[in-house]
Amino acid sequence: MTLALPVAEACLARHRVRMLGHEGPLLVFVPGFGGSQASWEPVATRFANKHRVVLMDLVDGHALDPGDGPAYDNLWAHGTDLLEVLGALDARDVTVVGHGLAGLGGLLAAIQAPRLFRQLVLLCPSARFLNDPSGYKGGFTRDHLNALMDLMAKDFDAFAEVLAGLAYGDKADPRFARELAARLATQDREALGVRLRQRLQCDHRADLAHCTVPCTVLQSQDDHYVPPTATDYLVSQLRHGTLHWLDASGHCPHITHPDVVERALQSVLHA
């Protein structure tokens, strides 16, 4: 899919796309829920000497324009956005590196247009965060989710602290949690609540087997969002899935342990 020039320019501006490097295979970094491309910079900039690196934002990762909301009530919309960005760049043979739910968005994009992708690298992904009566253990119960949303309504500062603690875990430098809490405080609270509930309730387990593109899962230890049961399930359902456990903790190792993530990604790219 190649977009007309005015459409392509609007698409790249909408996602604040930046290009680093001028030669080599295309490497696209996509931030997770509530994040921005800045979260990937500590890792991505190290690949610009041998790759054409693309940094981008998700639409619901920054202030939304009026009317954006309804289109982004599921991850398929983010997959479509990624395909539009690749079309605007006239990209082929792409490696997408997506954090968290952005990894699932990349997988859904690859299902729609597998010919565009060389491989997917999914950092701390989950196909389903909620536990399921079938015995699936996603890590969250419905009561956990409701309690989190109730806290958000009653005490936003406490909610932001809890969410930041879940993201970085107990072993990370406290400044990471403080920075995330401060960033959450600048977002539209109603929109953030809607997005968070939607994302924690998403269920893409049935989609995993439809991805024919090779996928490598990079998973850190002690991830409060993604327990080992969810990781093992996701990898087991992929047609071409490989799991690499990182010597890192928390849900955001690209921020807290960029050296570890860089080494793992170098290994994937040179495999």
Image (cartoon, helix red, strand yellow):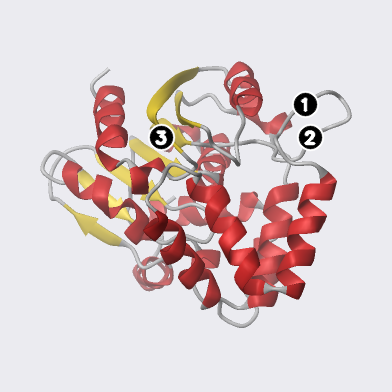
Outermost residue to the right: 133
Mark 3: secondary structure: strand
> Which residue is labeled 1 in the image?
136
Instruction: Evaluate if marks 1 and 2 touch, with contact meaning CB atoms under 8 Å apart.
Output: yes
> Residue at coordinates 61% horizontally, 78% vertically from top-left?
188
Residue type at numbered disc 3: Phe
* 186 relative to 36, above or below: below
Q: Residues within 10 Å of mark 2 (few under 14, many from 20)?
A: some
- Mark positioned earlier in the residue sequence (2 or 3): 3
Which label number is shown at residue 107? none
216 on left or right of 77: left
Residue type at numbered disc 2: Asn
> Residue at coordinates 30% horizontally, 27% vertically from top-left?
264
> Which residue is labeled 3 in the image?
117
Mark 2: secondary structure: loop
Mark 1: secondary structure: loop
236 on left or right of 144: left
Q: Residues within 10 Å of mark 3 (few under 14, many from 20)?
A: many
Image spot of residue 129 (x, y percent): 70, 40
- Mark positioned earlier in the residue sequence (3 or 1): 3
> Residue at coordinates 43% horizontally, 33% vertically from top-left?
120
Image spot of residue 47 (x, y percent): 19, 42
| Mark 3 to mark 1 CA distance (whole Å) | 30 Å
* 184 relative to 265, above or below: below
| Mark 1 to mark 2 CA distance (whole Å) | 6 Å
Image spot of residue 62 (x, y percent): 49, 71
- Mark positioned earlier in the residue sequence (1 or 2): 2
